[in-house]
Image (tube, rainbow, N blue to C red):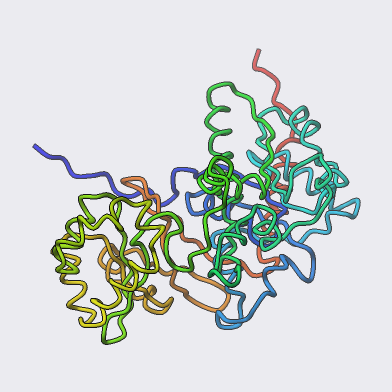
């Protein structure tokens, strides 16, 4: 007999975990928001009066910054002057009560606040300390400030992105996101190790090294092939055909082939030119890439005779992988996300907002989609929590009954 599933746990799998974060902009906040969505208590330390600089990037979300709303759902905001003697003492009290400390301050700033990783892990053996920086400690770049575009440039990503005439940056903060994801997975790994050994640890994530890992194929291609992959716009640099084609009614459809079986089916069903599959000009992916312009012109000629729906119907029949080239507004109304109920409401200082639920959801749990905090909204409650802990520690221990 099948038993019903247990009711969802609203606290989340990380309920009870305390994270203190001295964070700003994107990289560290991206990591800690993932922890907050899984139920961790994330205490976000912000500068009095101004807060996280991402609060002021824009005002497009009913007066709030789109970056801040995206990155700070579910956190508690505490205004604290950590450079003052009293504020620094409070900061260290909070760290002493935390499971995890995350920071992405400017180079050297954490050490000046007394947050040297070796000192912290010696003082708090179960603490996990994660630092996110641009270039990592040491080396000639170790003291440089870093921003997403600059890391994209240093990692060689900009040289690969854009069209043949001009390079371009990636349209989202990909270096920040890469380092934030490695910080997130590193924290979970360190917590898992703590469960095994009983001890925390300290580690650092460099934006350059995080994005560098994502540059892997291109680096191997260049190192051992002698030349870098060509900038190919929305097409794939090393696979053909792979990219956007425009139907006669203006519909843009992106398609991609992965092997010779698909190439034969593509020629036969989509292009309706079966003999093309044996044409020596296009016999193998390397030849197709070398003659990309010629091949793309053949495909474009066929696509121009079809409507978008007709082109999609042929791709479905082949079957060949494809995607419609959607705008962001169309993505927000994507039928697959709607069918899988991937949008949910969460609260904010400007009222309810809609956002995507986390990509990972454990069976039997609901994501903890808690509000976006106003600046300093939780200062009093967090300080009161510290006072309670202090008072409990000061209470005399009852004498053992004789």
Within the image, what quadrant is residue 4 found in?
A: top left
- In the displayed structure, 97 sits above or below 57; it is above
Q: Nearer the viewer, residue 315 or 49?
A: 315
Seen in the image, is 328 located left or right of residue 96?
left
Q: Is residue 76 left or right of residue 368?
A: right
Image quarter of the C terminus: top right
Residue 346 in percent (x, y) is at: 46, 68
Residue at the extreme left of the image, as rendered: 1
Residue 17 location (% of width, % of height): 56, 42
Q: Position of residue 178 (x, y in %)?
A: 57, 51
Q: Pick whichever, 251 or 351, lies toward us.
A: 251
**Picture quadrant of residue 350:** bottom right
Quarter-wise, where is residue 393 in the image? top right
Outermost residue, front direction? 280
The vertical placement of 229 against 69, above or below, is above
Nearest the camera: 122 or 203? 203
Name the side, left or right, on which 188 lies relative to 200: left
Instruction: Pick out the residue farthest to the bottom.
Output: 249
Residue at the (39%, 67%) spot, across then down: 344
x%, y% of residue 334? 32, 72
Quadrant containing the N terminus is: top left
Residue drawn at (33%, 73%) of the image: 297
Asked whether 110 or 51 is in front, the reply is: 110
What is the residue that sits farthest to the right in this orientation? 85
């Amino acid at each position: 007999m099948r038993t019903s599933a247990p009711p969802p746990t609203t606290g989340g799998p990380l309920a009870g975990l305390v994270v203190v974060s001295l964070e700003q902009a994107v990289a560290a906040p991206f990591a800690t928001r993932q922890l907050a969505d899984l139920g961790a208590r994330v205490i976000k330390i912000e500068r009095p009066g101004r807060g996280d600089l991402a609060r002021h990037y824009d005002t497009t979300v009913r007066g709030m910054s789109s970056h801040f709303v995206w990155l700070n759902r579910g956190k508690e905001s505490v205004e604290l002057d950590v450079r003052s003697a009293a504020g620094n003492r409070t900061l260290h009290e909070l760290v002493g009560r935390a499971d995890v400390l995350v920071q992405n301050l400017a180079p050297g700033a954490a050490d000046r606040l007394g947050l040297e990783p070796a000192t912290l892990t010696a003082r708090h053996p179960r603490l996990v300390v994660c630092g996110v920086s641009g270039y990592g400690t040491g080396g000639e770049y170790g003291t440089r400030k870093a921003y997403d575009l600059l890391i994209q440039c240093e990692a060689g990503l900009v040289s690969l992105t854009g069209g043949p005439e001009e390079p371009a940056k990636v349209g989202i903060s990909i270096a920040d996101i890469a380092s934030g994801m490695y910080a997130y997975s590193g924290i979970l790994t360190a917590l898992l190790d703590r469960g095994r050994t009983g001890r925390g640890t300290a580690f650092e994530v460099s934006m350059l090294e995080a994005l560098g890992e994502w540059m892997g194929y291109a680096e191997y291609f260049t190192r051992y092939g002698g030349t870098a992959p060509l900038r190919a716009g929305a097409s794939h640099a090393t696979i053909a055909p792979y990219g956007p084609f425009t139907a006669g009614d203006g519909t843009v459809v992106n398609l991609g082939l992965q092997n010779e079986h698909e190439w034969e089916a593509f020629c036969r069903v989509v292009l309706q030119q079966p003999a093309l599959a044996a044409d020596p000009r296009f016999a193998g992916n390397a030849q197709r890439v070398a003659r990309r312009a010629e091949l793309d012109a053949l495909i474009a000629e066929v696509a121009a005779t079809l409507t978008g729906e007709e082109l999609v119907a042929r791709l479905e029949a082949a079957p060949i992988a494809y995607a419609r080239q959607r705008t962001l507004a169309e993505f927000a109304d994507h039928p697959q996300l709607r069918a899988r109920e991937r949008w949910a409401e969460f609260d904010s200082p400007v009222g309810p907002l809609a956002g995507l639920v986390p990509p990972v959801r454990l069976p039997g749990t609901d994501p903890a989609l808690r509000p976006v905090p106003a600046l300093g909204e939780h200062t009093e409650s967090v300080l009161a929590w510290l006072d309670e802990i202090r008072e409990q520690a000061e209470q005399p221990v009852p004498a053992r009954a004789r």
